[in-house]
Amino acid sequence: MPGDDVKGILEKYKNGEFGIDEALQAIKHVGYEDLGFAKVDHRRHEHRGFPEVIFAAGKTADQVAQIAVTLRRRNDRLLITRANEQIYAAVKSVIPEAIFHSASGAITVCPSVASPLYGGYVAILSAGTSDQRVVEEAAVTLQVMGHEVRCLPDVGVAGIHRLLAVAEIWQKANVIIVVAGMEGALASVVGGLTDKPVIAVPTSVGYGAHFGGVAPLLAMLNSCAAGVTVVNIDNGFGAGYAAALINRMIAEAAAEAQQ
């Protein structure tokens, strides 16, 4: 652990094994483990409240498995995003309790009793069924970070009565994530109807002039509904992580107020 690492460095300095410059350099790198191809950050939990998350795309299955088992030694929760069956097989061979969420390509490790760690919940609204992969990535991210999620699929503006029919659910959420492709109008509509934080996720679902998600991205960035925050195209993980940070602060403040 970080404190133990610093103590060891100071003892080496005291014993003459390290000079002052060597000791300072070593302290700068406390808390990570060098695997050669990756420097695994063991202090991410201390800084962010959750262990380092592994982005699997672009890495080999063996690299992901090595990083995963290194993180698992010090953490009871683990999240890997943008994985596939081959990567999952490699991870499961070293972490048998790992679970693959095929809809989003996420791999998670959670304690056996994975009840929410925080009060309140995050609502995830999606404009259409085609956005489900991004919804799933956001939901899995929130769940492994210890938050309750309520998903409300297929409530896009083409049939706005569907959105209004479930308004009682998303209006009571602490945070709302809105996932939409096509023209991305759902984020503006929701943002204009709630006083809760709204995180918008544009998706790459749409026809030619949609430009692979650029159209809803620009629409969301230019929303006239104040307070709508936008993440990158198809970035369900980013939205889920941001919502988790916000919900944690709300839940902790509520718990403190009750004491």
Image: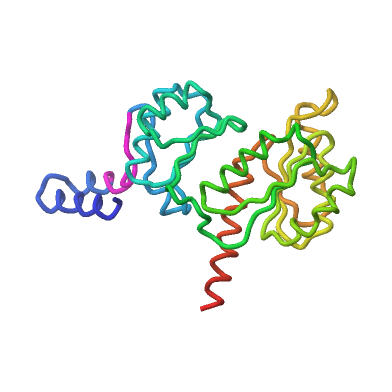
Q: Residue at x 85, y 26 (%)?
A: 209
What sort of colour scheme is used for the picture? Answer: rainbow
Residue 95 lies, in percent from the top left, at 37, 34
Q: Is residue 143 or residue 28 the one in the foreground?
A: 143
| Residue 80 left/right relative to 2 | right
The reply to whether the magenta stretch includes residue 217 is no
For residue 113, above or below residue 81:
below
Residue 232 lies, in percent from the top left, at 67, 38
Q: Residue furthest front?
A: 113
Dividing the picture into quarters, in which one does residue 38 lie? top left
| Residue 252 left/right relative to 204 | left
Residue 202 lies, in percent from the top left, at 74, 38
For residue 179, above or below residue 225:
above
Count every numbered label the image shows and give the total. Answer: 0
Q: Is residue 32 or residue 57 the one in the foreground?
A: 57
Residue 253 lies, in percent from the top left, at 56, 70
| Residue 235 left/right relative to 94 | right
For residue 55, above or below residue 157:
above
Residue span colored magenta:
25-35
Q: Residue at x 34, y 42 (%)?
A: 32
Dividing the picture into quarters, in which one does residue 40 lie? top left
Q: Residue at x 70, y 35 (%)?
A: 132
The reply to whether the magenta stretch includes residue 29 is yes
| Residue 242 left/right relative to 226 | left
Q: Residue at x 27, y 48 (%)?
A: 24
Q: Residue furthest left?
A: 15
